[in-house]
Image (cartoon, rainbow, N blue to C red):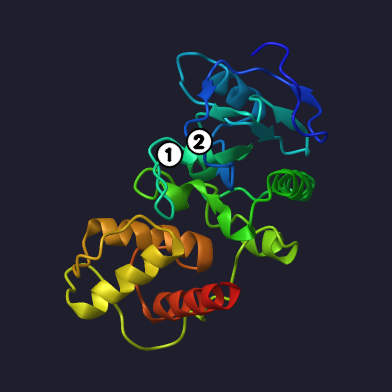
C-alpha cells in the first residue's frame, strides 16, 4: 500500500503495512475497536504490524507522546480484531476501524498508565473517525469485548469514562464493590444464570444462554468487568457485577 492517502488529518505520518485486504460485504464501517499494542515501544509495534510474517495490522497507532501513525487506509480491511464477535457480527474487521495504542499492557505488572498526551490524541482521533463514518458511541469497543477468550486489551486501566464524557463511548457508573447480594460463579446453573447470560448478550458479547456458568461465561464476565466494573476483574458475577449489568441494560434501554 505504498503511497496510500492518509485518511485522517490528525495522522503525522504513514508507515504502510502489507497486512490488509478488501472489506467484505456491503455493510458500512460502523465500529471502532481500541487495542493496546502489548509491545515495549511504538517502534517495536510498528515492526511487528509491518512484517508480512505477523499477519497483524491496524489502521492507526498512537504513540505515548501523542503521535498518530497510519498503517492502513481506512477504506481497507486491517487485520486487527482477528476471530471476533459483537452484536451478531462475526467479521468485525470488515465493519471497523482499528486503533492500536502504545502500551505494554499485561506484559507489565501493574498495568502502565496511558499518558495524558496519548489519551488526548486517542480522543481526537476517535472523534474524527466517528464523525466521518457516523459511528455511534455504542459501537466503540475494546479488543477484549469482541474477543474475550483471547484478548485483554485495552485493559482495565483504560479510561472509558473519559471517552464517554467526550461523547465517544458508552459507560455507566459501576456499582460499588461493597454491596451484598446474589453471586454467580462456576458451578451455578438455572434460570438466573440464563438471564444473566442473556443480559451480556444484549450488550453485544458473544455468549450462549446455556443456563450454566461455565468457563466461557467466566471469560465474558472478565471482559465485562474490564470494561464496566474495572475495580475487580475476576470472572465472578458478584453482587457489584450483577448490579452494574442492570445499570448497563437500563442505560441501553434509555438510549434505544
Q: Is residue 230 visible?
A: no
Dot 1: few (<14), some (14–19), or many (≥20) neighbours within 10 Å? some
Residue extending furthest front? 26
Q: Is residue 213 left or right of residue 149?
A: left
Q: Is residue 201 left or right of residue 35?
A: left
Q: As displayed, is residue 89 above or below residue 173?
A: above
Q: Residue at x 68, y 64 (%)?
A: 164
Q: Nearer the viewer, residue 10 or 116?
A: 10
Residue 166, percent from left and from top: 75, 61
Q: As displayed, is residue 188 above or below residue 103?
A: below
Residue 56, percent from left and from top: 49, 25
Dot 2: few (<14), some (14–19), or many (≥20) neighbours within 10 Å? many
Residue 15, percent from left and from top: 69, 19
Q: Nearer the viewer, residue 36 or 191?
A: 191
Residue extending furthest bottom? 180
Q: As displayed, is residue 232 above or below residue 206?
A: below
Q: Is residue 33 left or right of residue 6?
A: left
SS state under label 2: helix
Quadrant where the image shows the C terminus: bottom right
Q: Residue at x 39, y 88 (%)?
A: 180
Q: Nearer the viewer, residue 256 or 231?
A: 256
Q: Residue at x 58, y 18 (%)?
A: 50
Q: Which mark is residue 33?
A: none
Q: Is residue 158 visible?
A: yes
Which residue was labeled with disc 1?
91
Disc 2, disc 1: CB below 8 Å?
yes
The alpha-carbon separation of the residues under discs 2 and 1 comes to 6 Å
Q: Is residue 164 left or right of residue 149?
A: right
SS state under label 1: loop
Which residue was labeled with disc 2?
94
Quadrant where the image shows the N terminus: top right
Amino acid at each position: 500500500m505504498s503511497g496510500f492517502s492518509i485518511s485522517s488529518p490528525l495522522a503525522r505520518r504513514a508507515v504502510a503495512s502489507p497486512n490488509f485486504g478488501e472489506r467484505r460485504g456491503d455493510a458500512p464501517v460502523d465500529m471502532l475497536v481500541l487495542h493496546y499494542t502489548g509491545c515495549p515501544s511504538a517502534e517495536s509495534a510498528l515492526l511487528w504490524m509491518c512484517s508480512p510474517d505477523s499477519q497483524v495490522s491496524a489502521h492507526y497507532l498512537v504513540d505515548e507522546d501523542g503521535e498518530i501513525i497510519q498503517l492502513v487506509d481506512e477504506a481497507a480491511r486491517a487485520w486487527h480484531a482477528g476471530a471476533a464477535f459483537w452484536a451478531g457480527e462475526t467479521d468485525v474487521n470488515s465493519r471497523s476501524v482499528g486503533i492500536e495504542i502504545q502500551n505494554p499492557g499485561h506484559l507489565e505488572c501493574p498495568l502502565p498508565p496511558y499518558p495524558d498526551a496519548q489519551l488526548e490524541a486517542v480522543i481526537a482521533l476517535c472523534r474524527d473517525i466517528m464523525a466521518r463514518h457516523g459511528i455511534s458511541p455504542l459501537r466503540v469497543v475494546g479488543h477484549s469485548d469482541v474477543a474475550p477468550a483471547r484478548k485483554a486489551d485495552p485493559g482495565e486501566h483504560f479510561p472509558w469514562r473519559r471517552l464517554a464524557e467526550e461523547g465517544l463511548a458508552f459507560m455507566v457508573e459501576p456499582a460499588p464493590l461493597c454491596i451484598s447480594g446474589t453471586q454467580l460463579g462456576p458451578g451455578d446453573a438455572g434460570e438466573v444464570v440464563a438471564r444473566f447470560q442473556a443480559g451480556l448478550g444484549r450488550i453485544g458479547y458473544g455468549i450462549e444462554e446455556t443456563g450454566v456458568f461455565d468457563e466461557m461465561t467466566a471469560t465474558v464476565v472478565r471482559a465485562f468487568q474490564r470494561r464496566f466494573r474495572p475495580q475487580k476483574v475476576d470472572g465472578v458475577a458478584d453482587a457489584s457485577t450483577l448490579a452494574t449489568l442492570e445499570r448497563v441494560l437500563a442505560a441501553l434501554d434509555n438510549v434505544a
